[in-house]
Image: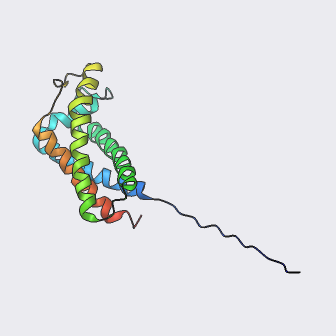
Amino acid sequence: MSTATETTGQTETTNESWQAGVVGGILGALAMGALILAMNEPTLAVAIPSLYTLAPPPNVAAGMFVHVSHGAVLGVAFAAIVGALDLDSTGKLVGAGAVWGVLTWAVFAALVMPVWLSTVGSPASPPFPNFAPPSLLWHLVYGLVLGGVYAATVDRL
């Protein structure tokens, strides 16, 4: 008669890509915020905080807080998408970041934000739709930084 002993071990696999998405989203939003401040401060001081009735009066700090928070959340969504698409090279991730930046501009900045600002009665409510070229540049920078930081940190966090 023979006796068999079975040993089992647990192999833990964790996917920490969301952390790289948060870091990339925060840094991308900070870079974008710097451009907004340089090019059109009222967007950051009035329009963005108005989404949550934090302005007027103008409040750059509240605007930056809201903006960076949105950037972090959208960075997590980016991490989920590139993870599902199994993108792993730096070039593909930076390219995906650029596409993500353009998509966030087209959907959130151009379509959602004007409706939201109008709904809350903001004095900074732009026309609908609001496909503003400077905003496209800002969102493209966000996406490029997000994709680059994500690529640099996804295997380190």
Q: Is residue 54 above or below residue 26?
A: above
* Count of labels in the image: 0
Quadrant where the N terminus lies? bottom right
Q: Is residue 26 above or below residue 121?
A: below
In the visual, does 87 lie left or right of 113? right
Q: Estimate the x, y position of residue 151 in percent, counting from the top left.
A: 31, 62
Res. 103 visible in picture: yes
The residue shown at (29%, 29%) is 51
Which residue appears farthest toward the bottom when viewing the image?
A: 1
Q: Estimate the x, y position of residue 110 in percent, counting from the top left.
A: 20, 32
Quadrant where the C terminus lies? bottom left
The residue shown at (29%, 37%) is 62
Q: Quadrant of residue 124?
A: top left
How was the colour assigned to the protein in this rendering?
rainbow
Q: Quadrant of residue 67?
A: top left
The residue shown at (37%, 44%) is 73
In the visual, does 63 lie left or right of 22? left
Viewer-nearest residue: 121 or 56: 121
Q: Quadrant of residue 20?
A: bottom left
Which residue appears farthest toward the right when viewing the image?
A: 1
Viewer-nearest residue: 83 or 69: 83
Viewer-nearest residue: 112 or 119: 112
Q: Estimate the x, y position of residue 94 in percent, counting from the top left.
A: 24, 58
Q: Estimate the x, y position of residue 19 in percent, counting from the top left.
A: 41, 56
Res. 59 visible in picture: no
In the visual, does 8 lie left or right of 69? right
